[in-house]
Image: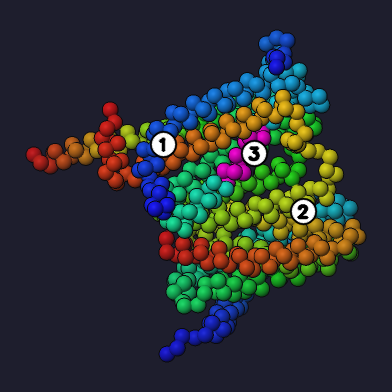
Amino acid sequence: MDSPSMGAAIQALLRRDLLLAYRHRGEIANPLVFFMIVITMLPLGISPESAVLGSLAPGMIWVVALLATLLSLDNLFRSDFDDGSLEQILISPHPLYFIVLVKVFVHWLVTGLPLALLSPLLGVMLFLPEAGFVPLFLSLLMGTGVLSLIGAIGAALTVALRKGGLLLSLIIMPLYVPVLIFGASVVRSAIEGFPIAGELAVLGALLAVSIILAPMAAAGALRISVNG
Amino acid sequence: MEFQFASLAEFWAMKGHGPYVWACYALTLSTLVYLLGAPRRRHHQYLKQQQRLKVAQAHINKSFEK
Amino acid sequence: MAWQWFYRMGSPRWFYEKTERWIPWLATVTALLLITGVVWALGFAPADAKQGNSYRIIYIHVPASFLALAGYYVMAVAGAIGLIWKMKLADMVMKSAAPIGAALTFVALITGAVWGKPTWGAWWVWDARITSMLVLFFLYLGVIALQGAYQHQATADKASAILALVGTVNIPIIYKSVDWWYTLHQPATLKLTSASSIHPSMLYPLLLMIAGFYCFYALALMLYTRAEIVQRERRTAWVNELVGGLK
């Protein structure tokens, strides 16, 4: 019997992961609730004044989105690793690159996309100036993609470790610095009235480079983790 | 090229910047010394530990032969 | 024939025996360079017109920063060689480079902060160079943490190599983005070092210190790698002889 074509394999993997995500749809809420709770703590810890919160809002929302993504990354490969399906996936004849890409895409669908969709609500709570809402959404939409892609590398490196979660955050956070800087600055520039096309382009470039390189590194890391 | 300070007291004080400069040089010296000492100690301790294990193993082997 | 030389270099035993003879010389050269450099830097280089004597800290801060960054590339290249050619010695060098680089980054950060206080009035400034150096410090810590997390040394080596390589790709991006972010928020009036416009009487001790630090780095790397070799190669005959030869 012919082994399935790559297209069919990707479709099957996509359907499987989406179905698994749907079955655990309660878990989608976790990073979102975290997002909201921390944003709630900010006024309590800093100040409830609109002027103060408004100026901090772009960076704060971005940082918290980053943390929420980090929390959810541990699960990217872990459940497959725990029940042995990851090993099976590694034996498959299809390039691991695309398999990782599909998994990261599903992860983004259930983590990054909801974060981006929720962000306007949080913008309202933090008195984000009007000009910032659409840029916030756009920057998070693209930026969380980069976060998921780079995060996949860390998730792959730590999947075989028992207490991999904190270590994952430690090794991935420095790599998040460029996305954070450009993501938050898109929002700030928009608020200050500057054109943001250039900065959005940089975010796009980061996304493009991550799509090309991150799955390769993650694939290599997966092989090392599983075979080690 | 001449010595820049009138006296050793002035050299130490560095026109008020003394604590900063000397703290930095002290930190660096201790770090460099540590970076040279730590591996040597580890190296030596490991070899000694292996030697002790060998000696202990030899004793055990001898006691089995008896 | 060239490849034979390459693979011979990859033998831990060869490295151990060669470095045994190199180390005394290297240590002498390092001491000479550093002692001359420090004496010159502290006592004979003229005080800066604007900064007074606090600028003497750059004689440590600059070499440490150079080595902090160069050391990361040493670590990443060693990791790549170990990953691609499966050379054990390269893995050992990579593991050894991590703590040395992290310590030098720490020195660079602290000396930078201490220099900042009398010079610009603040212990910490989130400028591009110092912030990038802080991120570099975290990258080093990540590799060190990863090294310690695995049961099998081979897995740890491969995983850290991947992390080090990913970090390498990111370092220029991180630096550029932090630099861009910083100039957006602060006018670029400060130049921490402008070596091209530095007076020769200040430049020469700096060059001596930089050379001394490079030699020191090589020395420390050799010492750490030798300790690592003895541990990893403990089952070989030649290491057993070493053990037996002890007092």
Residue A16 sits above or below residue A29 on the image: below
* Label 3 to label 2: alpha-carbon separation: 36 Å
Residue wearing tag 1 = C19
Amino acid under disc 3 = Ser
**Residue A85 can be seen, yes or no:** no
Residue A42: mark in rendering: 2
Residue positioned 48% across, 68% down in the render: A81
Co-location on one chain, circles 1 and 2: no
- Residue C45 falls in image quadrant: top right
Amino acid under disc 2 = Leu
Which type of secondary structure does the marked residue at label 2 adopt? helix
Question: Left or right: where does residue C77 sit relative to residue C85?
Answer: right
Nearest-to-viewer mark from 1 and 2: 1
Which type of secondary structure does the marked residue at label 3 adopt? helix
Disc 3 packing (10 Å; few <14; some 14–19; many ≥20):
many
Disc 2 chain ID: A
Residue C43 sits above or below residue A174 on the image: above
Residue C65: mark in rendering: 3
Residue C10: mark in rendering: none
Question: Left or right: where does residue A228 sit relative to residue C58?
Answer: left
* Label 1 to label 2: alpha-carbon separation: 56 Å
Which type of secondary structure does the marked residue at label 1 adopt? helix
Q: Tags 3 and 2 in contact by the CB under 8 Å rule?
A: no
Name the residue nearer the viewer: A65 or A223: A223
Q: Position of residue A34 (x, y in %)?
A: 68, 61
Image quadrant containing the N terminus of chain A: bottom left
* The magenta segment: C61-72
Disc 3 chain ID: C
Amino acid under disc 1 = Thr
